[in-house]
Image (cartoon, rainbow, N blue to C red):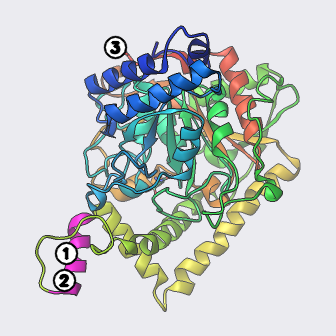
Amino acid sequence: MHNKTIKELSTLLHSKQVSATELARHYLDRIAASQHNAFLDVNPELTLAQAAAADARLAEGSAGLLTGIPIAHKDIFVTKGWRSTAASKMLGNYVSPFDATVVEKFGDAGMVTLGKLNCDEFAMGSANENSSFGAVKNPWDALAVPGGSSGGSAAAIAARLAPAATGTDTGGSIRQPAAFCGITGIKPTYGRVSRYGMIAFASSLDQGGPMARTAEDCALLLNEMVGFDGRDSTSLTADQGNAREDFTRELNAPLAGLRIGVPKEYFGEGLAADVEQAVRAALDEFVKQGATLVEISLPKTSLSIPVYYIIAPAEASSNLSRFDGVRYGYRAPEYTDLQDMYKKTRAQGFGKEVQRRIMVGTYVLCHGYYDAYYVQAQKIRRLIADDFQAAFKDKCDVIMGPVAPTVAWDLGAKSDDPVANYLADIFTLSTSLAGLPGMSIPVGFGQGEKNAKRPVGLQIIGNYFSEAKLLNIAHQYQQATNWHQQAPEGV
Ligand code: GLN
């Protein structure tokens, strides 16, 4: 059952071969027995109540394609019945009075929430090791990180603890964990998916998206996610291109004539041989399907790391100022006066990496440094976006390359070295800074410790609003290969 795709499960539900309740129980049992630390909160009673409601809709004939399909949410999306912690001690016991727009939309579609997924604290990280509630284990290799920050989402899908999950991507957090766990994920164009109820990290970059095993499943999920939301000030309207659309409509289009840009900066020094080999083999498959490869250049790629690690912390320092021990969340138990309460609350409630980013962000926004760092970073951000537009203008239709320079690293290997984590984001940050859609699909395996298989992801980047095209390309690849169907041992 748990090896079925959303599409297949939907058929079973609609033909009454399985009920939403049976499906929910099946996954809840798997979650209860799992050892990956992927889930931070479950509430079987509520899950089963949602499943019963889905069964009623299925019985009365008012069910849609996703009705009764279980989904788990990254613990960045707030949810009414499950704790919403952002994997931070600061929000350790926080229960939201409302659902995030994305959660609400999936609820309206009749999907059944399985629980909340572990992630890096406030989505800051690349390995899920910054969670206040412990690291997540990669289902392919218990010695490896699952990637981050949506590590719980990716691990849950790979371990078949959920057929669908939400993720958020600020600088790669959907694509990189999808790559490390051998699943499929897409970060839409910035502004397509509402950020309302997504606990804010860096508001000009944060974007929610679906994670599943196949491109087709991601298309089905994305169908419910996009659209204007007046409660998110940067949500795009239908007039701006954010009309709802059927992302499955182009899935079966042939790829003959597709021009794939291959950025030379993505294949240089630092790219591990096992990753390069799998990525190049995937490119060959596209050539077999009639695509052509065009070498392109994205010259500002290396600047994406300093630029991102100025802009994201700057926005984070502002967004996280709301956690002051007064309005909600954690408050230090002992303090002398108001100032002391703020200080102790924030020192005790935030983890190391979050505190580091608040300090960096506050620094670059200070009078005297603002022009030198923040304004400068904003200018280069524009140049990074221009690089992509130059490539899309007349050279290529999409861009492909690795998601990350290596396969998943060992748990603990970089946990004391923030810069090593930042450097591993080199291939995902530019897309986020430019606001472009990007996805990751599994294309093979590299080698970990003790010869364990560790998945490799191919990144596919498109121009604004090209999600249907990206999903089409990914789907065509998945029709011809079976990497996306492979499961970790014991699953
Ligand atoms: N790894 C990046 C960071 O640590 C991206 C995180 C994300 O996309 N949420 O900020």
Is 232 inside the magenta-drawn segment? no
Above or below 342: residue 180: above
**Around disc 2, counting alpha carbons within 10 Å, would you say few (fewer than 14), some (14 to 19), or many (20 or more)?**
few
The rendered magenta stretch, by its main secondary structure, is classed as: helix
Q: Does residue 443 show up?
A: no
Nearest to N terminus: mark 2 or mark 3: 2
Above or below 256: residue 334: below
Marks 2/3 in contact by CB < 8 Å: the verdict is no
Residue placed most toward the observer, 475 or 66: 66
Mark 2 and mark 3: Cα distance apart in space: 51 Å
Is 339 inside the magenta-drawn segment? yes
Q: Measuring 33% from the left and 21% from the top, which residue is drawn there?
A: 30
Mark 2 and mark 1: Cα distance apart in space: 6 Å
Give the number of the mark in front: 3 or 1.
1
Q: Specify the farthest residue to the front.
A: 60
Q: Which residue is mark 3?
A: 490
Q: Secondary structure at mark 3?
A: loop
**139 sits left or right of 441 in the view:** left
Which disc, if any, is residue 340? 2
**Region of the chain picked out in magenta, as a range:** 337-349
Above or below 112: residue 11: above
Residue placed most toward the observer, 422 or 441: 441
Q: Measuring 29% from the left and 39% from the top, which residue is drawn there?
A: 411
Which disc, if any, is residue 118? none
Nearest to N terminus: mark 3 or mark 1: 1
Residue placed most toward the observer, 50 or 209: 50
Marks 2/1 in contact by CB < 8 Å: the verdict is yes
Q: Secondary structure at mark 1?
A: helix
Mark 3 and mark 1: Cα distance apart in space: 45 Å
Q: Which residue is mark 1?
A: 344
Q: Amino acid at mark 1?
A: Lys
